[in-house]
Image (cartoon, rainbow, N blue to C red):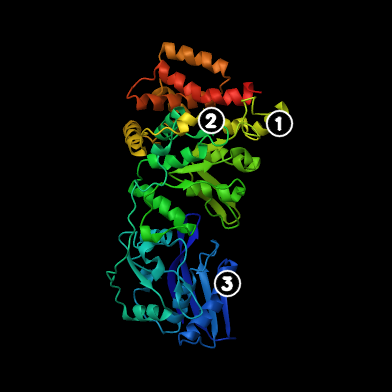
Amino acid sequence: MYSIVNTATIFGIDSKLISVEADISEGMPIFEMVGYLSSEVKEAKERVRAALKNAGYALPIKRITVNLSPASIRKTGAGFDLPIAVAILSAIGIINCEKLPSICLCGEIGLDGKIQPVNGVLSMAMEARRNNLQIMIVPKDNLVEARLVNDLTTIGVSQISEVIELLNEGVFEVKEEALEIEETSQEDMEYDFSMINGQQALRRACEVAISGMHNMLMVGPPGAGKSMIAKCIPSILPAMDSDEQLELSKIYSVCGMFDERGGLMKKRPFRSPHHTVSPQGLVGGGQNPKPGEISLAHGGVLFLDELTEFTKSTIEMLRQPLEDKKVNISRASGSFTFPADFVMVAAMNPCSCGYYPDLNRCHCSRMSIQRYLAKISQPLLDRIDICVEAPTLNFAQIALRQKNESSADIRLRVERVHEIQRNRYKNYDFKFNSQIPSSHIDMFCPLKAEEAKYMEEMYEKYSLTARTYHKVLRVARTIADMDGCEDISLLHLQEAICYRGLDKHYWEEGI
């Protein structure tokens, strides 16, 4: 007696279709499972045996062999319990369903036969649709998530007995259930720029950064408002389109962080990992690689507060993702690529006590300041487009009661600049000024004679590299778009150079 059932396993943030084969034959009574299995998958046989017994279906006293194919892919997770149970029940004749080849199943089974939710159902449903399967049977708690995928009949179950009855009847009608979706909007933000007094230069730098999706570093003493301003940045990010929502939801689904009550994720993410985060926690990895914080921030903001407190080897791992907008992880089980298209916003103090270069308050030695700033390498600084100072606010600025410009007003301007970039780069594989390849710099950031001469002077004065020179031009391109100018003027270049001047002030000249 033989049967085969379809399921899927998570591979990175995608899924791969898996065939669960069950064979019942004469021989020594044994329940054997093969197919490159992780420990939690090997344990499935005990869960399945007890669940079927408690549901009134004892396994035959025969040789039971279950194979999860293809054997070259490592199988992880508890979602194989349900397909293994169905494959065995089909092999012994308890389930007789002609539509099994067009059905994909997943779910963990408790010892009492209850179907438990699993991670990554959204990715699995997308893989089932891609392989032209027509029906997906999932745990009831994952039903809303599975129904986010169109052109696929999805049915939620809560007990193994329901699955048996459903498959034997062969009628797969989608019940119109009252699925509660919590509506969210871009306006539901805890932090808004209207809450920020003073710091006009910093507000301007934030608008430039988000308008061109540039990375930004804020340097200033404690209490200057760096963290609060960073938390306001998501409120000026434009809304995500449907493709972005689906990709981000898939990442969170695989990590077990997807709240299906809200449907597809509509708010751009804001991730702020603590400085004790491990390298795998930041960029992803592990024995069975999972996305890290940079992938959870995909399409949004990754905020690194107290940048110098992060382990140097950890933040140095951001170099490649900041350039490529993705992270490649290789393991014995395969190579994985996780998306990491985020805006990095970082904040740090200028020295250990936080008050340099105010020598009336800062008592750090020259060597102490050098050691502190040396925690941030020049190659990493070169990948940050905008470096801006956050000065201390005086009492008059803090106590100011005038109405500040709101995030909604700033977001309208940001959306206008994003639309300009979409139209300009519609025939290319990049979308924002920060992503202009070096080979296209001359095409999209041309300079006239006066501007070219100015940049030549600045190149020598600030000891720019080819990378930082191109970053200045990309930022200037964004500032020109904000002003509605087709050509980059001298004023645009001067502002862009100011955002690199602080870098030189602290790391080269300031000590």
Circle 1 residues within 10 Å: few <14, some 14–19, many ≥20: few
| Callout count | 3
Q: What's the mark number on residue 42? A: 3
Circle 3 residues within 10 Å: few <14, some 14–19, many ≥20: many
- Amino acid at pointer 3: Lys
Q: Which of marks 1 and 2 is nearer the N terminus?
A: 1
> What residue is at 43 percent from the left and 27 percent from the top?
440
Of residues 492 and 283, the one drawn nearer to the viewer in this rendering: 492
- Amino acid at pointer 1: Ser
Looking at the image, can residue 229 be seen?
A: yes
Residue 473 location (% of width, % of height): 45, 24
Marks 1/2: CA–CA distance: 22 Å
Residue 106 location (% of width, % of height): 44, 69
The kind of secondary structure element at disc 1 is helix
- Vertical arrangement, residue 309 with respect to residue 32, above or below: above
- Vertical arrangement, residue 487 with respect to residue 347, above or below: above
Residue receiving disc 2: 392
Looking at the image, can residue 466 be seen?
A: no
Q: Give the label, 2 or 3, closer to the camera.
A: 2
The kind of secondary structure element at disc 2 is loop
Residue receiving disc 1: 368
Marks 3/1: CA–CA distance: 54 Å
Residue 93 location (% of width, % of height): 42, 84
Residue 258 location (% of width, % of height): 43, 58
- Vertical arrangement, residue 111 with respect to residue 288, above or below: below
Marks 2/3: CA–CA distance: 59 Å
Of residues 117 and 132, the one drawn nearer to the viewer in this rendering: 117
